[in-house]
Every structure is written in C-alpha cells, then in structure tokens.
Image (cartoon, rainbow, N blue to C red):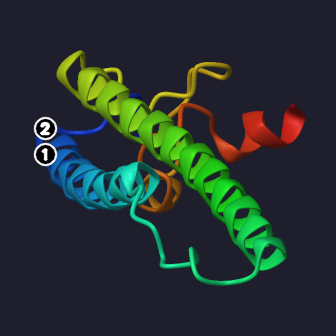
Amino acid sequence: MAEKTTYTKDELAEFRQLILDKIESAQDDLDVLRAATANDSDNGTEDTSPTFKQFEEGSSTLSKEENIKLAERQAKFIRSLNNALIRIENKTYGICRITGKLIAKERLKLVPHATLSIEAKNAQ
C-alpha cells in the first residue's frame, strides 16, 4: 500500500473543527488580556504613603507590560490557527514544509497549527 500523502476530506473537517474551537477559546483569552491591559482604574492608593503609591504604580506598569506581551503572543497564535485553516482549504494542511511528508495526526491534534513534522523539528 502506498504511503498516504494527504489527509482525507473527513480528517480535514475534523481538524477544521478542532482549529475553530481553539480559535474561539484563544480569542476569549485575548479579549480578557486586552481588557486587563486597557483597565486604567485606580486601586485607591491616593491616601497611602507616597512610597507605597510609587511601588504600586510600578507594579501596575509591569503587570500591563506582561499582559501586552501575552496578548501579542495570543494574537500570533490566532494568526497561526487562521493560517492552518487556509492550508485546510488549499488541501495542504498536515504536510511538512521541510520533508513533504504527512505530519502525524497525533501531533496535529496537540499542535493543530504545526507546519513541521517531529522529524523536521528535531533536525532544526
């Protein structure tokens, strides 16, 4: 029997649904991160000592920076998932861009936006 070179229509539909579910979840997480970043509410430190207020503001700035980094990472993850949907439509989903072989189904279930097989990833 010849080695399989593409996933079937049913398998691609299964991956498509998995990716859509992940996009929905990731978008919810991104919305929470963006809301946390945009939250400029004062936590009521105006009546505390100036030293504590500076510490609180520094902590708040650091927290916002972390949230911005997390939001950027989440947005990149969503773009990768959307690119995977495009590959499904093009019938190139699941094909390793280095070896040209099919990426293991188990790997795609864990990392549905993968473009490299384990073999190619290890070779990097």
- Crowd rating for badge 1 (residues with CA inside 10 Å; few <14, some 14–19, many 20+): some
Q: Nearer the viewer, residue 6 or 90?
A: 90
Residue shown at the point (67%, 19%) measured from the top left: 98
Q: In the rendered view, would you say 61 is above or below 59?
A: above
* Quadrant that contains the N terminus: top left
Judge the density around disc 2: few (<14), some (14-19), many (≥20) Cα neighbours within 10 Å.
Answer: few
Q: What residue type is labelled 2?
A: Lys
Q: Are marks 1 and 2 in contact (CB under 8 Å)?
A: yes
Viewer-proximal residue among 118 and 24 = 24
Among the 4 quarters of the image, the one containing residue 55: bottom right
Residue indicated by mark 1: 13
Q: Which of 13 and 29 is in front in this view?
A: 29
Judged left or right of residue 112, residue 117 is right
Q: Which amino acid does label 1 sit on?
A: Ala
Residue occupying the far top of the picture: 90
Considering depth in this image, is 21 or 90 the residue closer to the camera? 21
Dot 2 corresponds to which residue?
9
Q: Is residue 102 something that shows in the picture?
A: yes
Give left or right: position of 52 versus 81.
right
Placement of 122 over or under 100, stated as above or below: below
Horizontal and vertical percent position of residue 68: 56, 45
Classify mark 1: helix, strand or loop.
helix
Q: How many marks?
A: 2
Asked where in the image residue 61 lies, by quadrant, the reply is bottom right
